[in-house]
Image: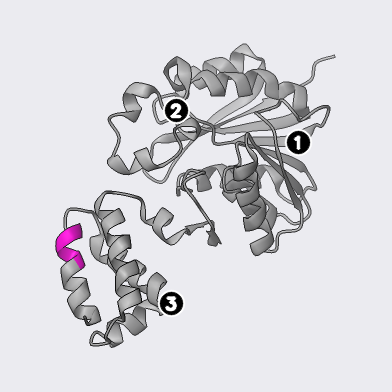
Amino acid sequence: MKIKEWIKYSSKLLKNINNFQLDINIILSTVLKKSKSWIICFPDYILNKNDLIILNKFVKRRFYREPLSYLIKKKEFWSLDFYVSNKTIIPRPDSEVLVNQALKIIKNSCLKILDLGTGCGNIAISIASSKPKCFVTGIDYCNEIIKIAKYNSKNLDIKNINFFVSDWFSLINYNKYNLIVSNPPYINFKEYFNLKNEIFFEPINSLVSKNNGIFDINLIIKYAKKYLYHEGWLLLEHSWNQKKKIHALFKKYNYINITTYKDYNSFDRVTIGQFIKFK
């Protein structure tokens, strides 16, 4: 089968998926280890039997809405390529707002930064790569996830970073940080089951939180103060409809300078607050 014939065949299968033509080109590029421009230039290239088997498996998985990032095991974030698996959620552009706000606070300072629930390490590594004078620590609740984050930091040659297992603050001990950042679970169960099919391939523990999506956010805001230096900052990603609740929690636990920033679609997405240690 020629490339152009396989594209025609797979297009019929994936026609109900948004941007299916781009997905097909990426799958071809990944399996054949050729650039997209090469694929366009050689539509009559004959696919061998082994390539066809792998290509058809990928298309079948995509037909059932498995995210493309899990198929090719890669996702770009902050102009960096991250290895991903179904043990971690897929990095999303909205989280770049969190990184951007962290960098604005850091400026040219040499700060200690903690990333809670680091996943594949995309937020922690993006900050560390942008601010090599800072030292970043990323934690998550299981060793399988931490192995992925460590792999990404090594693959991207990021030196000023460390990862270890901790269920939120459970193993942080007495360490303190200038910044704590987190993209915690914040979707409630009702919202979760109304989302697109693709979300069900991602680990539910990293997406859904109890108490109408606010349980983990409340825990982080409440206890982060113990691990922040005086005038340190807590930055949280959250759902578009949680701004009022999160502002209330920041105020309840005596943070100041509370501000919310919008994502690229103009939805409330990241809220920050500053911890002041009163004498």
State how far apart marks 1 and 3 are (Cα).
43 Å
- Quarter placement of the C terminus: top right
- Quarter placement of the N terminus: bottom left
Mark 3 or mark 1, which is nearer the start of the sequence?
3
Label annotation for residue 178: 1
Most foreground residue, 49 or 67: 49
Mark 3 lies on residue: 33
- Quarter of the view holding residue 14: bottom left
- Quarter of the view holding residue 176: top right
Closer to the camera: disc 2 or disc 1?
2
Closer to the camera: disc 3 or disc 2?
3
Mark 2 or mark 3, which is nearer the start of the sequence?
3
Identify the element where label 2 is drawn: loop
Q: Is residue 35 left or right of residue 163?
A: left
Please say whether residue 130 is visible from this viewpoint: no
Disc 2 + disc 1, Cβ < 8 Å? no
Q: Main secondary structure of the magenta part?
A: helix
Residue range corresponding to the magenta coloring: 10-14
Colour treatment of the image: one colour
Mark 2 lies on residue: 208
- Quarter of the view holding residue 19: bottom left
Q: Amino acid at mark 3?
A: Lys
Closer to the camera: disc 1 or disc 3?
3
